Amino acid sequence: MKNAGPLFLLIALTNCSGPTNTAKPPEKQPPEYFRVDPSTAGTVFGKVSFEGKLPARQKIDLDEDDQCVKLNPRGMFDASITVNKNRTLSNVFVYVKTGLEGKTFPKLQEPVVLDQRGCQFSPRVFALRAGQPFHVANSDPVTHNVHPIAKMNREWNQSQSPGDAPLQRKFVRPEIMIRIKCNVHSWMRSWAAVMDHPYYAITATDGSFAIPNLPPGQYTLEAWHEKLGTQEQKIRVDPSAKVQTVFQFQGEN
């Protein structure tokens, strides 16, 4: 029995170790997406007007790149403030800023494409959803550079030569706005809004916008312009209502 001690010690340690945990970790439940009732959804629509002196057209110096000069035989003018013939503004981003808290919306898988054409980014202002595929194409015979200067998302910076495949990226967090520039051509600018819901619009060439399929509720709308700043309005959307609103930005007197 002299050698029984180690055997008993081994049995004791084995028994004290307890039963092996073979339970599977709980499966991650898919998010519960908010579903809009189309029978009660409303629409917000309107326009963004411009008051004051029309800004002088400023010609952009393209001489740093001969190819860009050839692509723009009539020259290129600054488009940061684009006033339409009816004194409205294009490229204003209008969106629901508050009122949708606690609602989760399905992800989008169709890519949003930003092109580089004629030594300009196109479109100048655009929106996509957080996590939605983002592709950047280069349709020019010129090497460009794509540099989103993000704060909430990862900043990146990549050159893109003629004929290169589109760059494929994602912005995973909501952020308004992300300025995108080309480090090769200083005048190239674009602005991206990364959203966590589908209730936004960008004004057209007549200054109009529409945000459909909005559930009834109290909301804050914001209109964003790259040079003229932001404006907010409180609105109420009743069931099946069509709510009209106007934002007015002021230029120089």
Image: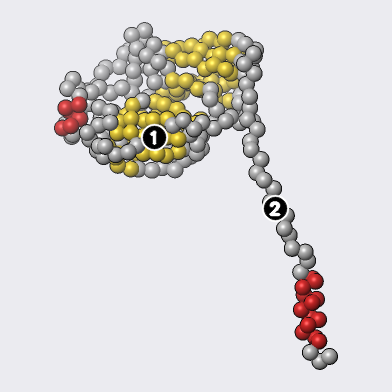
Badge 2 crowding class, 10 Å Cα cut-off, few under 14, some 14 to 19, many 20 or more, is few
Q: Nearer the viewer, mark 1 or mark 2?
A: 2
User: Any mark on residue 23, and which?
Assistant: none
Measuring from the top left, give residue 156's x and y in whole percent: 38, 43
Q: In which quadrant is the N terminus drawn?
A: bottom right
Q: Quadrant of the C terminus?
A: top left
Q: Give the mark, 1 or 2, whose residue is nearer the N terminus.
A: 2
Q: Residue at 73% x, 55% y: name it.
A: 23
Q: Amino acid at mark 2?
A: Lys
Task: Tell me residue 113's x, y (percent).
Answer: 39, 30
Q: Residues within 10 Å of mark 1 (few under 14, many from 20)?
A: some
Q: Which residue in the protein does label 2 denote?
A: 24
Give how far across and how far down residue 73 sits, in percent: 17, 22
- The Cα–Cα distance between marks 1 and 2, rounded to whole angstroms, is 39 Å
Expressed as whole percent of the image width and height from the top left, the position of residue 44 reads 54, 14
Q: Which residue is mark 1?
A: 135
Looking at the image, residue 80 lies above or below residue 180 = above
For the residue pair 83 and 240, the one nearer the viewer reads as 240
Residue 72 shown left or right of residue 128 in the figure: left
Q: Front-most of 236 and 203?
A: 203
